[in-house]
Image: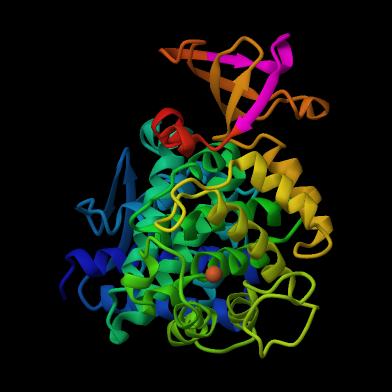
Amino acid sequence: MNLEGEFYTSVLIKTLVLVNNMRLYGPDHNITQKSLSEFDGLLKNIFSQFDEFTLLIRGWHIYLMGERIKISSINFPYIKQLIELAQQKEIGGIKISKNYKIEEISKFAELLASEQLKQHDINNNLITIGIGSIKILPPVAPYQTEFIDPQKRAKQVYFETINMVKNLTTIQPTSQKTYYTRFTAGVLYLIDTLKTSESLLLGLTVVKNYDDFLYNHSVNTAILSLSLGVRIGLKSKELLKLGQAALLHDIGMINIPRSILQKESFLTEDEWKMIKTHPVSGVKITLNLMGLSEETAPILLAILEHQKGYDGSGYPDFVKTNRISLFSRIIQIADFYDAVTTPRFYNPIPMSPAEAIAYTVKYSGKLFDPLLIKHFINLLGIYPLGSLVFLSSGEWALVAGQPQDKSKIHKPIVLVIKDQNGRDIPNKMIDLSQSDLEIIRAESPWKYNIDPAEYLV
Ligand SMILES: [Fe+2]
């Protein structure tokens, strides 16, 4: 048996997927059962060569059957996730002996998935119910803290998610199943990170990409959609589907010729017709990836409908309804906001974030779901992150955060970047809610050739 690269990675992924599915769906759901039997298959494979399954965590490293797993760009996200799970549970390792039964693995994964239980409680539970084949070891040394530096983690998650979407365009049909599992694990990780570091991830949505618009846009749309989803109280299972749909909403664009996507003038009628095919071709690509089931139908529907307005306007024309799904309504707002605030080949000076917010308010109840727009403004403020604002002092600043006090939504935290004479100012952050300075007006930073990401990320 080859214990190199791919196999190591699949042990990490299948362990994580089993625990995640147990958490999301519970032990009896067929999705959990499937991941349980996949994990069982993996153990059988290991026991054909070893007498014991051992997974040990030491600092930054994971050892499987005594061998250290080499960290690569492919397995890094899973190594991180496993270490974070272990940190949370205060676990130093897992041992499973050859005489295990699949029901015991199921019970063990259920204990591991339970939010409150730590290493000690899990071991006690295993002893109480008479499971002797599985043991959880305590940590041997303090955990490395670098993994949990929230700023670093948010950046890593952001750029890894961009790569994950990019990789979708190059996978062979035979590897689609593996990709889908990784994709699911990646989206769950994005959601986990969002729950602890929402403002950091929202801050990263100021990263725009002129040449390769699609991938940054997909991740920005997913972050904004998921933040909205959390605000309206969606449960984990729903957030997973929403995140998957948001990341894939524009994937049909990969079938549109680059000459059209990068055209510097307005599109002809025929070119527009091409663009309008992207929701349907996005559905086809996603169908190939995840198939049609009760779980995937809402994702496919959201991709199909994301260009439809709240009032039923927009395209595709054959969707004749003004009752579009909740996921579609969420993604439509996030998609619109990110798209219009990003410079494009045909429109190098996009709307300012504040203008985009004002537009969504103007068309709230027509193009956009009014209730969701209220949450969206609560989320981004009236001067969203990355807005270029001119202060009453004559200085230029970029909005870097929203005030704690929500009644002072017009007074965000700003990073002053230029003085009255347009000279650069380094590192001057002002909380306007604690200052007499006022915002005089907001404009698109791109109008002045300012890329907010260069200052804020
Ligand atoms: Fe789209």
**Vertical relation: 457 (above or below) 65:** above
In the rendered image, the vertical position of residue 43 relative to residue 449, given as above or below: below
Tell me the magenta residue range.
429-442
Q: Quadrant of residue 182?
A: bottom left
Rendered image quadrant of residue 352: top right
Residue 309: tell me if it is visible. yes
Left or right of 55? Residue 373 is right
308 left or right, relative to 428: right
Kindly identify the residue that appears in the image at 47 percent across and 54 percent down. Answer: 347
Which quadrant holds residue 387? top right
Q: Nearer the viewer, residue 65 or 18?
A: 18
Nearer-the-camera pick, 322 or 97 = 322
Q: Position of residue 272 (x, y in %)?
A: 50, 77
Q: Is residue 413 magenta?
A: no
Where does the image place residue 170, in percent across and percent down from the top left? 28, 74
The picture places residue 397, in percent across and down from the top left corner, at 54, 22
Residue at 78% from the left image edge and 57% from the top image edge: 363
Task: Reply above or below: 315 against 186.
Answer: below
Q: Nearer the viewer, residue 185 or 142?
A: 185
Q: Is residue 445 left or right of residue 140?
A: right
Residue in view at x 39 percent, y 37 percent: 147
- Split into 4 quadrants, where in the image is the C terminus? top left
State whether residue 26 is above or below residue 423: below
Give the total of numbered labels: 0
On the question of residue 99 being in view, the answer is no
Quadrant for the N terminus in the image: bottom left
Q: Quadrant of ligand 1?
A: bottom right
Snapshot colouring: rainbow
